[in-house]
Image (cartoon, helix red, strand yellow):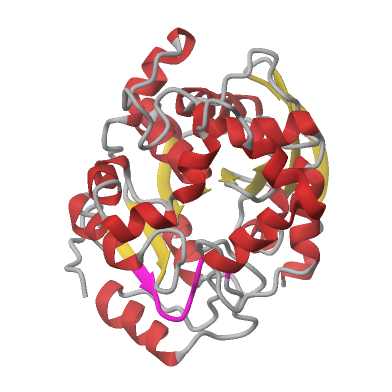
Amino acid sequence: MATSWPLRVSTVRANELEFALIEAGSGPLALCLHGFPDTAHTWRHLLPVLAGAGFHAVAPFMRGYAPSAVPGDGDYSVGALIADAVALHQILGGDGDAVLIGHDWGAEAAYGAAAFAPERWRRVVTLAVPPAALDPVLFSDYEQLKRFFYVFMFRDPRKFAETVAARDGMSFIDKLWLDWSPGYQPGDHLARVKECIREPANLAAAIGYYRAPGAPGASGGSPGTTARYAGEEQAAARQAPQPTLYLHGANDGCIGAELARGAFGERGDIGVSVPYAGSVVTVDHTPPASTSRLCVTRFGIDTSSYAIVSTCVLTRSLPSAIERDVVRPRPSVTRVSPS
């Protein structure tokens, strides 16, 4: 039972930065990386399940998100995120049986870390953000460009985004969640998110991810120009060799599911389009039967106890697909035609 695996809070120093962690269990490392606007708490229901499956499940607060430190050099490039993941793997005693789970910016870091140091990660699960190879599709679609308004707003050289995001109790963040996950009520979780980025330095850090060289859709493309992480940035443009399970909410209001489906065939991995899930959707007990049928018939995965959230972030009823994908062997290549 998940309740038998209490969550622990700790701090480690990795890549010359202090990281706050939420963790549970012991065994091979399962590193869970969150995105924007979110927090390590988003994995609080997944961590005990992974612990029960025999993993040391760890969710760091990403660089710049309190209570993790704000980097003095202000580097939020994908290369830096990749270096953080690799350094956390080392400091947490990870080995070749470690698994990597990333959502949003965490997904960007996961793709790159798996390609940069493939010997460290056995499997990869990503949520909500497809591989970089799909960027030309995303940034050439008119409807998707409208959904990406916040990306261009965050990159405005006048940097007025911080003022807008902080105004009226950070109501801008509330509206993003409403747009991205229609009908989902985040409640206390969103209060935790705001607490992590309420201070000006933390809010500037969260927005800084979008201003960094090499960020998806940024001028100059990827790799970025941060010399310290040149190798990591180059890896971000490569396809990782590990089997990858990709999850995307069918009703995601941030990245259209119709575009994300292109990722399913591009990499030759398993892609799951989750019916009725938005960008932040909670399914408390079991998902609609169609979700189970989709996964059982197409992927051979039983999802009878699933819940998908966030741009597919995971909540109380863990998607069995993730648990089974990181625990059990499966073929490295399964091509899935878009439905």
Residue at the spot x=43%, y=51% of the render?
Answer: 148
The x, y position of residue 215, in whole percent, is: 42, 32
Is any atom of residue 330 visible in this view?
A: no
Question: Toward the viewer: 101 or 161?
Answer: 161
Residue 315 in magenta?
A: no
Report the side of 118 relative to 48 (left or right). left
In the rendered image, residue 261, in percent from the top left (x then y), is placed at 27, 63
Q: Residue at x 41, y 64 (%)?
A: 248
Residue at image coords 52%, 32% = 156
Looking at the rendering, in which quadrant would you find the C terminus? Answer: bottom left
Q: Is residue 303 above or below residue 75?
A: below
Residue 43 position, x and y percent, is: 66, 56
For residue 41, above or below residue 28: below
User: Camera-side residue: 181 or 132?
Assistant: 181
Front residue of this view, candidates 127 and 323: 127
Residue shown at 31% from the left, 27% from the top: 221
Q: How many marks?
A: 0
Residue 144 position within the rendered picture, expressed as x and y whole percent measured from the top left? 34, 57
Secondary structure predominantly adopted by residues drawn in magenta: loop
Classify residue 226 by image quadrant.
Answer: top left
Q: Outermost residue, top direction?
A: 227
Query: Image check: 57 left or right of 11?
Result: left
Q: Is residue 327 visible?
A: yes
Q: Is residue 234 left or right of residue 95?
A: left
Q: Nearer the viewer, residue 127 or 196?
A: 196
In the image, residue 273 lies in the stretch drawn in magenta: yes
The N terminus - image quarter = bottom right
Query: Magenta segment, which residues?
Result: 272-280
Quarter location, residue 257: bottom left
